[in-house]
Image (cartoon, rainbow, N blue to C red):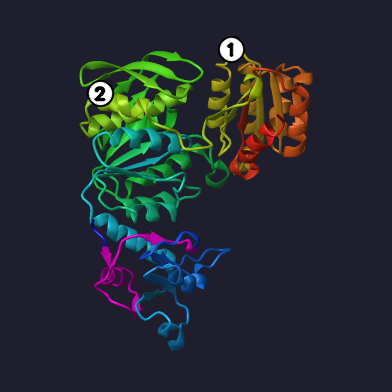
Amino acid sequence: MKNLKIKEIIEETNGKLIQGNQEEECQNFSKDTRTIKEKDTYLAIKGENFDGNQFWKQALDKGASTVIVENISISEEELKNYPNKNIIKVENTLEALYKIAKKKREKYSIPVIAITGSVGKTSTKDIVANVVSKKYKTLKTQGNNNNNIGLPFTILKLQDEEALVLEMGMNHFGEISLLSNIAKPDICIITNIGTSHIGNLGSRENILKAKLEILEGTKNPKIILNNDNDLLHNWKQKNQNNYDIYTYGIKEPSDINARGIELKESEGKFTCNLNGNEIKITVPVGGEHFILNALCAVSVGKILNIDSKKIVKGIEEFQLTKKRMDITQLPNGIKIINDAYNASLESMKASLKYLAEFKNNRKIAILGDMLELGEYTEKLHEEVGKAVYQNKIDILITSGKNAKAISKQAKQDGMPEEDIIDCQNQEEIIEKLKQILKKEDIILLKASNGMKFYELPEKIQKIF
């Protein structure tokens, strides 16, 4: 273990030790007093709507040995109540978090793999981490803790791990640059460049620029790109002499290519050439996009010299983070595909394509608004409507102001009007499902997180 000493924290943050022992080590860090454990270090994060500094005493009362607070007044009487505790005061706890995490990262000479992209970050992270874990003890981003708070706290969890797999998300320029400079990745992965957050960034080209910030925190990284993505393919063509680039793909000739793809409802199979040998891989989730995720994991395994049998095993045994292609079996053979955590044009199209693979079932797509699309909002929702019709979805249910453009376009393309249902809210969706559900139906749930479609599976199950 390579724990930070209090004196190191003070030095990095330019903080002041109000009380305590500067030689003491800080092993576990937390920002939530509800989950504080004995001897934890509580970092009081101050946000727009929440001030963790209000709870420093509560953290100590619950067993924390150290608190890091931001410019608050602490009286002598209060200090007397915590004689054996460490209290550090800094100017800005968020900035302190970045500096502490960066210092922690510098203590480890281990492979650090960073993943970004418009869609597929979390599922790629899951499958890559599972492959890496077959050779190294691996720490990975939990859930979608991929922002300026989640990533540093993930790094602070490092103990005796031998590899680190991090997911990096963003909404605006500069955000991934910050994360990259904290994490200093050795391997940088970009899964694709799509339309997520295009309302904030203005164009796909600008989204590419923002994603490429992943390279800013490190020197001479190995870069892994999805070669089937048009912008990444073009960037690779222009920059292949300037960087150490590895590619994977299905359509474009790449370093790692999938061949002989077989797609089923619950799995996908393919072969690829690894170090001159043909290997057969089964991905335990349906959908072509998961084949791409698996190819990315093969690329990581190749770079890290992981045995091909272990790479295959890592892919075949990986499990998805919840709310991403999570399939629930209901009575009468009805299934819910819960892919409701987030949505963009690319992920909508991928989910609809996956739904279409259920050839022997009636297919119901329940789709909501995609958010943060700005002036592209109507156009991109119309594109989803086209995908609904092209994939021969049997029943379309939409909810949300923007989602009306989905149903409008699907109808315009030729989907029967009686198979299109616009709902005002979740309660109306449930009432419609009560009326129309039949045996063996397959239901897809897909919308941006702000639509709260993740609440629907439990409500649908109550129908039975």
Left or right: residue 450 compared with residue 128: right
Of the pair 434 and 454, the residue shown nearer to us: 434
Under mark 2, the amino acid is: Lys
Q: Are marks 2 and 1 in contact (CB under 8 Å)?
A: no
Q: Give 215 or 82, whichever is nearer the viewer.
A: 82
Instruction: Locate residue 116, reporting x and y percent.
Output: 41, 40
Residue at 30%, 52% (x, y): give it. 158
The quadrant in which the N terminus is found is bottom left
Judge left or right: residue 439 versus residue 34. right
* Quadrant (top left, top right, bottom left, bottom right) of the C terminus: top right
Q: Is residue 194 visible?
A: yes
Residue drawn at 23 percent across, 43 percent down? 220
- In percent of width and height, residue 356 lies at 58, 17
Residue situated in front as seen by the camera: 464 or 378: 464
- Residue 72's place in the image compared with 117, above or below, is below
Q: Position of residue 346 (x, y in %)?
A: 53, 30
Residue 386 makes an appearance in the image: no
Label 2 sits on a secondary structure element that is helix
Residue 5 lies in magenta, yes or no? Answer: yes
Residue that numbered label 1 is attached to? 359
- Residue named by callout 2: 309
Q: CA distance from mark 2 to mark 1?
A: 33 Å
Q: Earlier in the sequence, mark 2 or mark 1?
A: 2
- Residue at the outermost bottom position: 76
Magenta residues, as a range? Answer: 4-33
